[in-house]
Image (cartoon, rainbow, N blue to C red):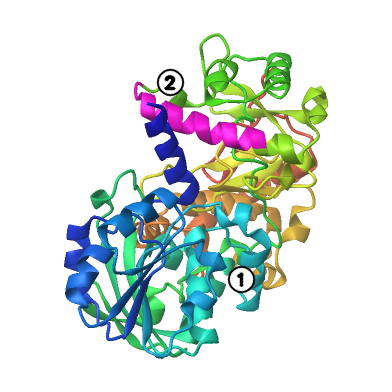
Amino acid sequence: MLEEKNIQSKKYQLGQFFTPANLVSDILPQLDIQSDIIVEPSFGGCGFIEPMTTVYKDAEIVGIELDKDWYDKGVEKYPNLNLIHKNFYDINDEMLFDTKRVSFLGNVPFRSPAYSLTTHKDYVKKLARKYGVTGIREEAVFFIIKTADIMITNDYEGGIHYIIPKSLITNDSKFYMQFKKFIKKYFKIINVFDIDPTKFDNVAQDLIMLSMQKGGDETDYYVKHNGAEEKVDSVLQMVNPDIPFQEIFEKTYLGSVPAESFLLSVSGETKTQFRDRLVKIFSKDTTPASLKVDLSHKGKYHLKVLSSNSADKVDAKLQVIADYINETKDKVNVDIFKDIANYQVIQQRKEIRYYFRHKDIKKCSFVYEINPNPQPSFYFTSNPSAGSTDYFGYCEFDITRNSSPGCCRTVPLENAAKNIKADFAKYWKKATDDLPIEMVFSYIQYVSKSDWYKKQKKLRKRFYFCLPKVFMKEWLLEIDTETEAKVIRSFIDKKIPKKIEKFGNGLFEMVDNG
């Protein structure tokens, strides 16, 4: 059991999702690779290398693997291949070849936040800045940039052919748009096709094979997409029929911390009980075994997975949380956990729960962006998966009722009008005949229920919230402008009851708990 727990923890930490060799055998005939050297940058279980040695008999196969256990198994199986035990981000001289015909092929690690932000933070951030791709924490993106840097620096003529999360091309935030522009600048995309995620263990997100050749082309050329010819900007979703949230607001925030770690209270636990439990955790050595007791309150846990019947899932999650806590001990003065003022209240669905919040936690690699001034805020779904539920509404601080800061964003309501971008303010004034800008929050609620939004979400699989470029006049017919403006202004001025359960029918519905 201990061995299996360590394997699961390592899979999560390194982003290991190995590709079955039979799946690779189906993939390779769809690729056009004509290179003297083909590099597999994270060969793992040799799922790619095994069929590569058969399909590319005339090419030299080079494999790189960080995990010593899998490297040793690869050497045992393929003693005559050039296999390298090293972190891909430390690879430089090993990629100096006499030929210019060099390609990269494989299934890169994918994990957010990237493991490399712990081991090679300065290097990967410097590399990302070099190519104008900032603000992304996904390991697969860093792997692609590193690969591109090797090809660009050495003037290689081959291509990159990687299995990656589909969200890398469907995500239309400004940061991922930078990434897609980087790809078009240095590479020409040849082929993009879906990969069945059920062929992998514990992979829930959509996957694609991205095949591209060195040599940029920034025009809107045609590429092969799932067997059909399609414009590249459409495949990369670079031309949108909407206004993404980052073009609406000057600033939005992610939640303070990933609540799935250890910083969220248990259902029914008081603030003081939660504080005392965290103080206890940080006063002694932390192991998965100790957390099995210390994370519970009256037999309950803050996460459903910790109550799972699967011992493997529980042990793997406990190991992840133990790693988070031990990193916190190394980087933070743990006395901050003693201060009751650092424990904030949230409305978690139908109950009050608490989460720990302090600026020093930002030193930890697993922590997301922190709002420096938590306050009553509007929250909205920023990147839902195809099957997720959409949440829009009010939260008292900077974390939402579904306690998932990675997928929701908040907009502070104080001085909300000053947080609207100038171009959007002009659009709003013209489209609504100069309604109060704060009413944009009610419009978001309206659009989230529209057929337009549902179709966009279905099309994109993972869809950052946007408003239509063509204003929906129907919304204006459904609202009582005078009443709504009065409600919104009262809301911004904090003169209404503090508890607001939801926004509905274009109006803020207020609930006075008496």
N-terminal-most mark, 2 or 1:
1
In the image, residue 265 above or below residue 293? below
Query: Which span is picked out in magenta?
Result: 309-326
Q: How many marks?
A: 2
Magenta stretch contains residue 313: yes
Residue 119 at x, y = what percent?
Answer: 61, 54
Residue drawn 45% across and 64% down? Answer: 168
Q: Nearer the viewer, mark 2 or mark 1?
A: 1
Which residue has dot 1 on it? 128
Give amino acid for label 1.
Ala
Q: Residue at x 55, y 40 (%)?
A: 404
Relative to 13, say whether 100 is above or below.
Answer: below
Nearer the observer, 393 or 70:
70
Count residues near mark 1 (Cα–Cα under 10 Å), then give few for <14, some for 14-19, many for 20+.
some
Which residue is at a point 56% across and 74% down the rendered structure image? 178
Task: Check disc 2 and report its element: helix, strand or loop.
Answer: helix
The answer to whether 258 appears left or right of 465 in the picture is right
Residue 11 position, x and y percent, is 42, 45
Front one among 155 and 394: 155
Per the rendering, the mark at residue 307 is: 2
Question: Label 2 amino acid?
Answer: Ser
- Confirm whether the magenta stretch covers residue 6: no
Residue 260 visible to the viewer = no
Q: Left of 41 or right of it: where is 191?
A: left
